[in-house]
Image (tube, rainbow, N blue to C red):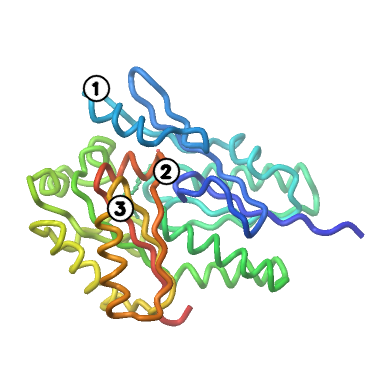
Amino acid sequence: MEALKRKIVADSSCDMTSFAEADFAAAPLKIITNVKEYVDDAGLDVAAMVSDLKEYNGRSSTSCPNTQDWLDAFGDADEVFCVTITSNLSGAYNAAVTAKEAYEAAHPGKKVCVLDSLSTGPEMVLIIEKLAEMFRENMAYDAICQKISQYTKHTGLLFMLESMTNLANNGRVSPVVAKVAGLLGIRVVGKASDVGTLEQLNKCRGENRALDAIVNHLKELGFNGGKIRIGHCFNLKAATTLKNRILATYEKAKVTIYECRGLCSFYAEKGGLLVGFEKAGC
Ligand code: X90
């Protein structure tokens, strides 16, 4: 009997273009301006996009993968585990469910498990890494579907933003909240809410205080001292400071830092930080 082909698929808001631990594909979102369309795939020059956007004053928006984009990412896998950005801020999840139905109808016996992360970026990274762990343990499809949806209830996302202009212009946060983030020196700290929307927690004067606020929230939200993934948009300095502060309190934490890809860079904007972490019970 031929080996079962298992694959992890996610939209590009997970900030991963490849993955060494399992068969993986990302379905790209797009960032659209009046002059250019940026496809958020491995070929995207994120630095060039961020600098273009800084000079650009017109309208900009994003679009999620459509059903065909998802089908392309599924390829010919027998079992697909598909992780999406929060269904409350994007159509990516709905398109993935439609793709699942089409894929399973066209290929009897093949299965797609679609997971709404109710989050994005580094929290999706944790989910993807956990899936690979379950693959290695040779868990059955149904058990993985069940266990991974449990896992997502024990992960969280915090963020620090310097500007929320693109979020507000695209209707993803209220203009009132966004205005605060536009004030000089103010950093908005927030989290992904239980329903997968942005929830503002603090308005901090300066990055230093914002990073302290994040460390405090990690404690309140039940960080288990284990895995943390920090994604940053051209703010390695803040990411590194945060990593060191986390390690000062949680010696055994497994903290990694990476650069955001296109979608998260567009919305988190220059200076933004996203923090995905595990909570007790996972
Ligand atoms: O479908 C689309 O066009 C994509 C829309 C995505 C909108 C939100 C992206 C947020 C990216 C910002 C900070 C963290 C937010 C946490 C949300 C649960 C990153």
Earlier in the chain: of badge 3 and badge 1, it is: 1
Is 203 positioned to the left or the right of 123 in the image?
A: left
The residue wearing badge 1 is 58
Earlier in the chain: of badge 1 and badge 2, it is: 1
Label of residue 16 in the image:
none
Could you say which is closer to the camera, residue 15 or residue 106?
15
Q: Examine the rendered structure and indicate whether residue 231 appears above or below residue 150.
A: above
Amino acid at circle 3: Leu
Queried on whether the Cβ of the residue with tag 3 lies below 8 angstroms from ligand 1, the answer reads: no
Could you say which is closer to the camera, residue 236 or residue 155?
236
Task: Find residue 160 and report its horizontal and vertical position in percent.
Answer: 24, 56
**Residue shown at 45% from the left, 82% from the top:** 281
Circle 1 or circle 2, nearest the eye: 2
Amino acid at circle 1: Gly
Circle 3 or circle 1, nearest the eye: 3
Task: Find residue 11 and report its horizontal and vertical position in percent.
Answer: 51, 45
